[in-house]
C-alpha cells in the first residue's frame, strides 16, 4: 500500500475507529520514528498545531502531564 492509500483508508474510518487506530498504533509508530533524531523537530510543529486547533494550551498540557506522573 502507498502512503496515500493508507491515509485514505484511515480517513474513511468512523470517528471511534480513528481514535482506536491512533491509540493502538501511535506508541509503536512513535517508537520507530524516534530512532531518527531529527524526526522530533519535524513532529513538534505538527503537535503544536494539534494543540492550537484543539484549544488546549501548552501550559494545560504540562499540568496534565505533571498530574499523570504523580499517579504512577
Image (cartoon, grey):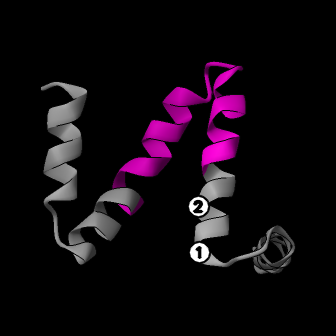
State the count of labels.
Answer: 2
Q: Residue at x 29, y 59 (%)?
A: 21
- State how far apart marks 2 and 1 are (Cα): 6 Å
Q: Position of residue 11 (x, y in %)?
A: 21, 56
Residue 62: mark: none
Q: Residue at x 62, y 29 (%)?
A: 34
Q: Residue at x 38, y 58 (%)?
A: 22
User: SS class of the residue under badge 1?
Assistant: helix
Q: Is residue 27 above or below residue 56?
A: above
User: SS class of the residue under badge 2?
Assistant: helix
Q: Main secondary structure of the magenta part?
A: helix
Label 2 packing within 10 angstroms: few (<14), some (14-19), many (20+): few
Determine whether label 2 and label 1 are within 8 Å by CB: yes
Q: Is residue 31 left or right of residue 12?
A: right
Q: Residue at x 75, y 73 (%)?
A: 72
Q: Quadrant of residue 50?
A: bottom right
Magenta region? 23-46
Q: Position of residue 42 (x, y in %)?
A: 64, 31
Residue 54: mark: 1
Q: Position of residue 53 (x, y in %)?
A: 59, 69
Is 40 magenta? The answer is yes
**What residue did someone put label 2 on?**
50
Q: Quadrant of residue 7?
A: top left
Q: Is residue 31 above or below residue 65?
A: above
Amino acid at each position: 500500500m502507498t502512503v496515500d492509500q493508507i491515509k485514505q483508508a484511515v480517513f474513511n474510518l468512523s470517528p471511534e475507529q480513528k481514535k482506536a487506530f491512533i491509540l493502538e498504533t501511535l506508541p509503536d509508530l512513535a517508537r520507530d520514528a524516534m530512532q531518527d533524531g531529527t524526526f522530533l523537530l519535524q513532529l513538534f510543529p505538527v503537535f503544536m498545531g494539534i494543540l492550537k486547533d484543539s484549544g488546549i494550551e501548552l501550559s494545560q498540557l504540562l499540568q496534565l502531564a505533571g498530574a499523570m506522573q504523580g499517579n504512577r
